[in-house]
Image (cartoon, helix red, strand yellow):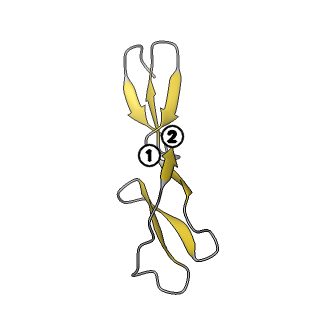
Amino acid sequence: HELRSSWRTDNYLDCHCSGIECCTSYMTPVNYDKEKCVRIFMKETCVYKVVEKNDHSKECPVRERVG
């Protein structure tokens, strides 16, 4: 990549060339009911949804995200 260029990788890292520096472009849910719910990465929107394991139409509350 050229110096001072920017791009997003296939793994959804936002990169900027001033040397090289990458960071995630999304927040990862970490504090939710893992017994009842599952997190699903939505590639189209570059976000995680947290939904009930038995009914993916019902979203679960998330108390903390990192990234």
Dot 1 alpha-carbon crowd within 10 angstroms: few under 14, some 14 to 19, many 20 or more? some
17 lies left or right of 38 = left
Of 42 and 28, nearer the camera is 28
Mark 1 vs mark 2: give the one in front: 2
16 lies left or right of 40 = left
Q: Position of residue 48 (x, y in %)?
A: 46, 59
Amino acid type, mark 2: Gly
The reply to whether discs 1 and 2 touch (Cβ–Cβ < 8 Å) is: yes
| Image vertical order of residue 15 relative to residue 62, above or below | above
For marks 1 and 2, the one nearer the N-term is 1
Q: Position of residue 40 (x, y in %)?
A: 51, 66
Q: Which residue is painted at 45% across and 80% down in the image? A: 56
Q: Which mark is residue 15?
A: none
Dot 2 alpha-carbon crowd within 10 angstroms: few under 14, some 14 to 19, many 20 or more? few
| Image vertical order of residue 34 relative to residue 53, above or below | above
Q: Position of residue 8 (x, y in %)?
A: 42, 38
Q: Which residue is painted at 44% across and 66% down in the image? A: 61
Q: Position of residue 54 (x, y in %)?
A: 54, 86
Amino acid type, mark 1: Tyr
Q: Secondary structure at mark 1?
A: loop
| Image vertical order of residue 23 relative to residue 35, above or below | above
Of 50 and 5, nearer the camera is 50
Of 61 and 17, nearer the camera is 61
| Image vertical order of residue 31 relative to residue 17, above or below | below
Q: Which residue is mark 1?
A: 26
Q: Which residue is mark 2?
A: 67
Q: Which residue is painted at 41% across and 13% down in the image? A: 3
Q: Which residue is painted at 50% across and 51% down in the image? A: 64
How far apart marks 1 and 2 lie (CA) works out to 6 Å
